Amino acid sequence: MAASLGLGMIFLDALIVNVALPDVQREFRVGESGLQWVVAAYTIGMAAVIMSSATIADRVGRRRTYSVGLSVFVVSSCTCGLAPNLGVLNVARGIQGTAAAAVSVTSLALVSAAFDDPDQKARAIGIWTAIAATALALGPALGGVLSEQAGWRSVFFVTVPVGVGALVLTARHVVESGDGSARSLDLGGQALYVVAIVAFAWTVIEGPHQGWLSPSILTTSTIFVLGLVAFTTWELRSREPMMDVRLFGNRTYTLANITLFTVLFCFYGILLVFTQGWQNVRDASPLVTGLVIAPIAVGQMILAPRVGGWMRTVGARRQR
């Protein structure tokens, strides 16, 4: 339950904020690119450290890493809700993302470590998935209600009691686990990875507004390409790489990653367009917008717990 609540908090935050974005835009009087950074700051923070978070959890303890991640997420959520301007909101969102990375990578590890029996472990993972999927389904509608009745800041505070509850349960019931033989942190690869993804995000978000051939966009796009090349070169030469890029030589692995990237890229892009289109163009309320988005999440809630069983029956390739 402790691990499920933490992941549920992350999933809830992933969708609940999107419905409130038009209200954020109106209060801070920002354009589309400014609004995009509210979403991008979170995902950049999460993507930047998610691989290193797994290594840290193995080395210092999964329970400890999970608890620190929960604490940081709760504090940064409060900061988002109290943010006086867009700059503070974006910084807090970035910190939220890094905390979300620590929570997400340790959540499943804690569930797996808690059960030795394969059947019990399978049932526990099923419940873990169902709780997270339920939070995902509740996110849009709950975000709409909160935004409409209490203002956009309330969507950040709603995850606080969930995080506190997960912290209490973790302290009382979760046993520490780890891997003493875990590899060391790849600090060079981590730094180059951050440079590359931040440059990529800046180029994609600011390009349409500043012009694709403007000096700043040409600079950031060049930094992205050079950063990606430098990261790949570093990882190939590293004894303990953060990302083993040689795995991309496996066709199945590469196709799976491309598929997942495409699905998530489109999914979160659609969410941003939906919230903007329904509220700013159609003049719909946050609640109506949340209800329009909800079927996407409900579908995931219904199907996600069943995917494992279907995979054993029909095979992963046919199911895909």
Image: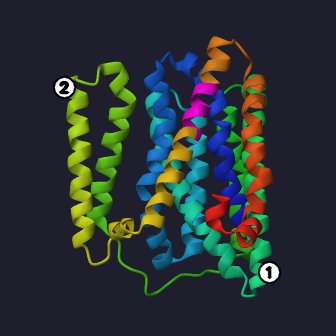
Identify the residue under disc 1: 120
149 or 55: nearer the eye?
55
Element type at marker 1? helix
On-image quarter of the C terminus: bottom right
Position in image of residue 119 (x %, y %)? 79, 82
Quarter holding residue 114? bottom right
Identify the residue under disc 2: 215
Residue at 70%, 67% in the rendered image: 311
- Stretch of the chain drawn in magenta: 267-274
On-image quarter of the N terminus: bottom right
Residue type, mark 1 in image: Gln
Residue at 74%, 73% in the rendered image: 172
Residue at 67%, 77% in the rendered image: 112
Residue at 59%, 82% in the rendered image: 177
Q: Which numbered disc flags the more N-terminal residue, 2 or 1?
A: 1
Residue type, mark 2 in image: Pro
Q: How crowded is mark 2: few (under 14 residues within 10 Å), some or many (20 or more)?
A: few
3D distance between C-alphas at marks 2 and 1: 58 Å
Whether the magenta-drawn stretch holds residue 282 is answered as no
Position in image of residue 135 (x %, y %)? 75, 49
Element type at marker 2? helix
